[in-house]
Image (cartoon, rainbow, N blue to C red):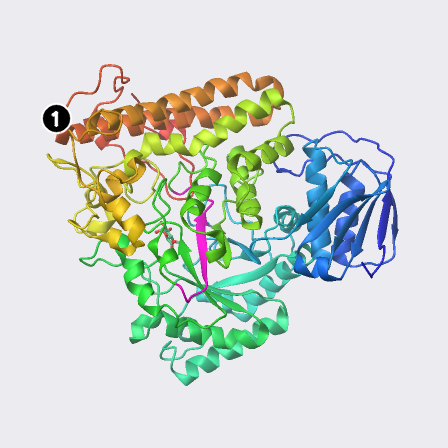
Amino acid sequence: MVRQLLVSILFCGCTLGMSAEDGSRLWLRQVNSGNATVNCLLHSRTLDIAKSEIAKGWKGAPVSLQLCNGAEYESLGGEGYTIRSVGGNIEIGSVSEVGLLYGTYHLLRLQEMKADVSKLDIKEKPAYSLRILNHWDNLDGTIERGYAGHSLWKWEDLPATISPRYEEYARANASVGINGTVLNNVNASPEILSADYLQKVKVLADIFRPYGLKVYLSVNFASPMALGKLATADPLNPDVMGWWQKKVKEIYSLIPDFGGFLVKANSEGQPGPCDYKRTHAQGANMLAEALKPYGGIVMWRAFVYSPSDHDRAKQAYLEFQPLDGQFLDNVIVQIKNGPIDFQPREPYSPLFTSMKHTSMMVEFQITQEYLGHSNHLAYLAPMWKEFFGYVQPNSLRAMAGVANVGDEVNWCGHDFAQSNWYAFGRLAWNPALTSEEIADEWLKQTFTTDSRFVGPMEQVMCDSREAVVDYMMPLGLHHIFAWGHHYGPEPWCSVPGARPDWLPPYYHQADKVGLGFDRSHTGSNAVAQYPDSLNRIFDSLDTCPEEFLLWFHHVPWKYRMKSGKTLWEELCYSYDEGVKKVRGFQNVWEKMKPYVDEERYGNVAGRLDIQMHDAIWWKDACLLYFQKFSKMKLPADVEKPVYKLKELEKVKLPISNFERPTKDMLPNP
Ligand code: GCV
């Protein structure tokens, strides 16, 4: 350690009262200790934030923040840090200011978890240098697939009026190590690149910078036409290239550390290079060339599918795999975790194991588009860990998560949805953390360290995603959601003239023989996109993991499952299990009342009530509908349906993406 002691902070512990528990403080609920004496040799905005966090929240031994160099610190990279007990002090060391800030949040986390902080010897380094939130926020303030109010970004008020939430947002991200944010929807308006909007973006970038949070933008590939009035957006056209180069220069003159672009091209109607018979690689590389002189990157999404004869699950691979090795080194191909679209359970996208010469990043969805919006308690770390059970973390260069925050007081709508924002950050920092460890950290900081609360609620959280799978789409079923809103069940859905791959029967393939999509060698052969060892396992009915059975196979109703039950019985018991699990969550939550403030207790209880209702709705809708094909009885010990299929078929939720389904909008038994 060469550069020396910068900060030392002495404390006298003095506790101020807690503010109301409306969830707005997230997991950062340190009580202001006040009265700290701060001795500081150096100042910068980042260091001042770190010092003030310690001064406000830390109650232990004096802390020093040290900018360090030398082999140990170089090996921790630009954002790593150490935290060590030395004599009666605690030293946080890093090569960078932001590393010191991350170390500060780590130390505070330990305190809030009531961990032993007497003999600290911690070394931390993030697994990925890019840990990025993707906001699907539109410039009109709405959020595509957002369930916690409107956008945090008040574009109308910017750049003049600055919401205090901008800084709170940056702080929350820094506290879990998130270091990038794409501000706008991948269905991007060209307007975001206009001079006016760039002034607004600059203001946000300036607020986020001290927290180590870089700004990125989603761009519309046809921006040179919409904004620059060019006749084409062909990536090989010199005027188009020139337009992008000029635009990039303008951005960097305002935001010198701008991160780069995220692009959804030739996907769901968005423009792209294929409109000009160019490849995705040609399109991405043209933007990458423009960004390269400034150190910017392109995140190019592989979420593509079209109404073709090919199984939708195969299409991204068919389009992108042949381009392997053709992308420039500042392009990262951003791939959704599964081959379809953020379903409650999908196998991993086979692109991850087939692009050997391309930088890749995974896109997880933190917002619960397909997992009950902000009404259902669904902790998603187990889903993301499942992905890492198949895909080696070090085969990726970065991690992205579609954000679940909006302008509601508690940021995420459901108080427990905050845990998914938290878990995304923690896993992007360290994908080896377990779901249990992350839940434990989050619960202790967000509610209480009392083991009578943490133990049962950790169990609830860790069981919750599987419960959603059970009551919505067990055994590999997928995409049997109602048209448009992706909330309730509509396995029967048919819309005249609609694309078949936007309709549930395309995915479940129910008929009198059985259920499920045959993707084995006798069907679409999507299994062949996986490495041989997995191909063989998925291809055979005998070896295919049962959680993926109906994803890869069309299975006869009387097929014997490993449990000895028929497929039909197993399906019934799975749905029933989902309902029972949610009832169990409700029972546990009732017992948690003594440990939780009234406001958050009531908020969660109300949403669990809706989740309970929805679980039954899903079970009845799916079982009664599939029964028309299986023609078999529900096992006697499965809960009797409370709904009639005919009534459920009439349900049309009067909701847009932007309204939360409430009890009175949902079907009545
Ligand atoms: C932003 C799904 C969602 C769309 C989303 C799209 C994407 O289709 O329903 O809302 O658009 O994925 O990821 O681009």
User: In the image, what residue occupies the spot 42% across and 80% down?
Assistant: 240
User: In what quadrant of the picture does the C terminus appear?
Assistant: top left
Q: Secondary structure at mark 1?
A: loop
For badge 1, the amino acid type reads Lys
Residue 184 in percent (x, y) is at 49, 57
Instruction: Tell me which corner region of the image, top left, top right, bottom left or bottom right, holds residue 561.
Output: top left
Question: Can residue 321 be seen from the camera position used here?
Answer: yes
Picture layout, residue 556 above or below residue 167: above
Horizontal side of residue 60 vs 649, given as left or right: right
Residue 599 or 636: which is nearer the viewer?
636
Please tell me which residue is depicted at 21% across the width and 23% down the height of the picture. 644
Q: Position of residue 468 (x, y in %)?
A: 38, 32
Residue 190 on the magenta span: no
In the rendered image, which quarter contains the N terminus? bottom right
* Span of residues in magenta: 356-369
**How many numbered circles does the render carry?**
1
The residue to which callout 1 is attached is: 631
From the viewer's perspective, tell me whether residue 56 is left or right of residue 174.
right
